[in-house]
Amino acid sequence: MSRDQWWRTAVIYQIYPRSFADANGDGTGDLAGVRSRLPYLRSLGIDAIWFTPWYLSPLADGGYDVADYRVIDPAFGTVEEAELLIAEAAAIGIKTIIDVVPNHISSEHEWFRTALAAEPGSPERERFWFRGGEELPTDWVSSFSGDTWTRTKNPDGTPGEWYLHLFTPEQPDLNWNHPDVRREHEDILKFWFDRGVAGIRIDSATMPVKDPTFPPVGQNEDHPYVDRDALHEIYRDWRKVADSYDDPRVLVGEIWLADSERFARYLRPDEMHTAFNFDLMGRPWDARELRTSIDSTLAAHEPVNAPATWVLSNHDVTRPTTRYGREDSSFSFATKRFGVPTDLAKGRRRARAAAMLTAALPGSLYIYQGDELGLPEVEDLPLVALQDPIFHRSAGTDPGRDGCRVPLPWTTTGPSFGFNTQGFTPWLPQPGDWGSQSVEAQQDDPGSMLSLYRELLARRPRDGEFSWHDLTGADVIAFHRGTEFVCVVNFGADPLQLPTGTTVLLASSALVGDQLPTDSAAWLRLSSPPAKAEDPV
Ligand code: TEU
């Protein structure tokens, strides 16, 4: 495989900069903190880092409200520091992917402030979606609940025009029919590609184009703001920018679409290189469900010859250790609730097995910071500490996403468990027992989640054709990669007899003789050629 196709099998580690490591001790993570932890990332065995937004932002939505793409938020550092970080990471073989958020910008962005100060009907307002009238222009509901339109005030205090925001009012949607919007985003890509960034993650990539007549959802066959055909022109233009570099840059889409044919359209050869596939993440811990997901994911990517991506979590979803410890272990945005009974011991076992399962599948793998430590969702954050707009807009019924964004524990003791060395209180409080899950507590323990991650990243198969193994059944997932490697996951209540003539390369929990316990995974090496799988049950 040529060097410039690295993303096809890459392991990409997601850093949420606010919560990774805080070098200057102000309670918020920063780029200097990331730089100080590059040796840790190298020893973990990753190929690239994806940074959630690090730009100037009032943080109304954790940085997904960008006020200026050409400025790093002062809480995180400077553009010069970002360049240093990109170069230092590259020097140890780690590439950098950054987030671009085309659907909206911050209401503090100069464009929006100028638009608000300008008259209705003025050119400054045309970069957004402003509409007049007494009534809400549509009944579209925000992804974060509530209305998608907010009414401005005229200088004399009377109600003015409405503007569209699919997320919060602090995130006005851009009008992608406007040439400035297109040109500006291509310039932003160049700005960062010129600074050594290897790729971009495209936020909410199915949402930027709108039906300008604003019909109700469901009135027409096409959705008024999701997956509209004109999006593909935009990404084709971006692909040209990415391909204009000698060392081509990668486009990774955040694409939540159930229809695999529609999903694959974004991965055509002149569009994105890869896109997150969230299907597996949404499914419960169940062999049939996950097998269906693996089949449909691989099938969706095959016709476009794009690599599949495997994602167990990110900064938006309940941590796997917690999610898999629940009776309903599926994930959807609507299922976040306070007080869901959770068996963390079970969740931990399953999260270990899930890590081995996804790492063995063909394609690229995303790891969200802290999952390599098996951190649980922090569910007892004081309500006054919660910052996520999802919590605030749900009138307190949905805890929001702060529970998976709590600053990482690096050391077993110390006021912030090594998040900073100055002992300054982190922006979200860490649980009292956070130190027991820290890097320091895990790094020399061969049974820890961190040790498992290091092993599996070092040994995961990067090539070898995928095919189902005949152990696959109602409670078992088993597949080959090539002729010698097999991954087996036991979902059943009883231990599973492993096939004879195999060597165990790695297991997520201790085997009992040659039996794989419940909720566990094993990687095997076959000493004899594989039997061909019949159509599994
Ligand atoms: O998330 C996208 C997102 O939350 C929606 O597209 C989601 O699929 C939908 O609401 C489901 O109903 C991204 C970021 O990952 C997230 O952190 C941001 O808050 C969001 O975009 C807005 O930029």
Image (cartoon, rainbow, N blue to C red):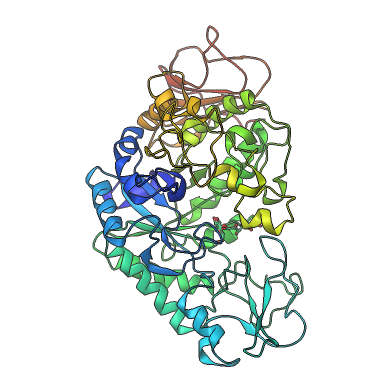
Q: Residue at x 67, y 51 (%)?
A: 333
Viewer-side residue, 361 vs 195 = 195
Q: Is residue 393 above or below residue 318?
A: below
Q: Is residue 516 left or right of residue 143?
A: left
Q: Percent x, y for residue 457?
A: 39, 32
Q: Percent x, y for residue 163?
A: 63, 79
Q: Is residue 102 left or right of residue 461?
A: right
Asked if residue 483 can be seen in this view, the reply is no
Residue 190 is drawn in which quadrant? bottom left
Q: Is residue 203 left or right of residue 290?
A: left
Q: Is residue 354 above or below residue 518?
A: below
Q: Residue at x 67, y 22 (%)?
A: 492
Residue 382 is drawn in which quadrant? top right
Q: Residue furthest top?
A: 513
**Count of numbered tags:** 0
Viewer-side residue, 381 vs 521 = 381
Q: Is residue 478 above or below residue 10?
A: above
Q: Percent x, y for residue 178?
A: 50, 83
* Image quadrant, ligand 1: bottom right
Asked if residue 513 can be seen in this view, the reply is yes
Q: Residue at x 73, y 52 (%)?
A: 396
**Quick one: quadrant of the C terminus?**
top right
Q: Percent x, y for residue 432?
A: 55, 30
Viewer-side residue, 441 vs 237 = 441
